[in-house]
Image (cartoon, grey):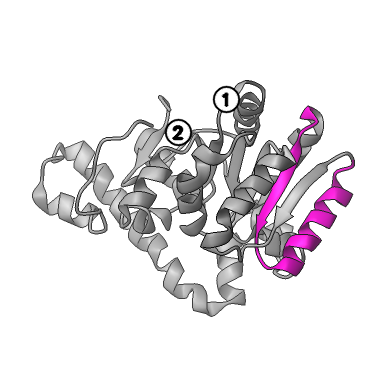
Amino acid sequence: MKDRLKILDVWVDPVTRETAIERATNFLRHGQRPHAIFASNPEKNFSVPADAELYRAYGEADLLIPDGVGMIWAAGFLYGAKLKRVPGSEFIFDLCRLAVQQDCGIFLYGADEEVNRRSAEILAERYPGLKVSGRANGYVKDVEMPGLIQQINESGARILFVGLGSPKQEKWYATHRDALTHVRIVQGIGGTFDTIAGKVNRAPEFWRQHNLEWLYRLLKDPRRIRRQKAIPIFMLKVLVEKAKRVLGIENSSLVRRFLRPNSPGKRTNRPL
C-alpha cells in the first residue's frame, strides 16, 4: 500500500472505519484472490518481527486496520496522521452488513464448537438476510485441513472469519490462501467469537469510547499485565524513533539495537 505507515517494525494503514469498509467493498466487487485484513496494535511490534514467516504474512496483508490506541498515537506522533481506532472485534460486524448488501455468504472458522455454533446463530439473527454459508471450530487437525479448505470452497462463501488467535490465524492464512478459490476477504479476528457468543464480555461502551478498553481488560484480568507491559516499551521506542528522525541519527548502531531487538535474523524485501 502506497500510503501505508511504518511504525517501528510493523505497519498500519491510515484508514477510518468508513474508508476501511470502502476497501473491503472493493475487495469483494473487484478482487480476484483472497485479501487479508489484520489488526495492527503495539503488541504486534514485538511478536511479528520475531517470526520471519509471520513478518512476511503480516507485511503482505491487504489491509492493516488501526486496532490499538498505541498505533493511533504513534501514527500521529511520527507522521502527523489523524487516525481513529478501527477495532477488529467491531469490524467483523461491518463486514457482516457488507455481506448482506453484496448478497454474499460468510464462513466462520475458529473457537470451540459451542462458541462457533452460537456465534453463527447470533450473527444470522442480528443481520437479517445474512448467509452463513458454513462454519468449523478451531480444532481442525493438520491432516483434516484439506477437507476444511474444500468445505470453505464448496460453501461459496466470499468472506472468511478466522478466529484462531494471533499469530496462528495469520500463519494459517499465509499457508492456505492460494487454495481458497471463492473467498475474497479473510479477516483475522482473534477471540471475537468468544465475545459474540457471550463467553467473554467486552468493555462497556464508556470505556470503549474513551479508548480505555485495554485498562478495563487489565482491571478485569490482572494477569494481562505481562502483555500490557509492551505498551510503555512501545511508546518509549516511538519517542526514540522520533528523536532519531529529528536529530538525523538514523545510522546509529546503538539506536538500531534499541529499536529492533526482536527482528528475525534474516529478512528479505517483500512487496506491500
Picture layout, residue 146 above or below residue 233: above
Residue 256 x %, y %: 17, 50
In the picture, measured across the screen, residue 266 lies left or right of residue 7, that is left
Q: Assess disc 2: are there few (<14), some (14-19) or many (≥20) residues with their C-alpha within 10 Å of its C-alpha.
A: some
**Residue 66: where, in percent of width, then height?**
52, 43
Residue type for callout 2: Ala
| Secondary element at tag 2 | loop
Report the residue marked by disc 2: 81
In the image, what residue occupies the spot 62% across and 20% down? 30
Circle number at residue 32: 1
125 is within the stretch colored magenta? yes
Image quarter for residue 257? bottom left
What residue lies at 26% left-to-right and 35% top-to-bottom? 269
- Magenta range: 102-128
Kind of residue indicated by mark 1: Gln
Q: Which quadrant would the N terminus be assigned to in this image? A: top left
Front residue of 55 and 11:
55
The C terminus - image quarter = top left
Q: Is residue 161 visible?
A: yes
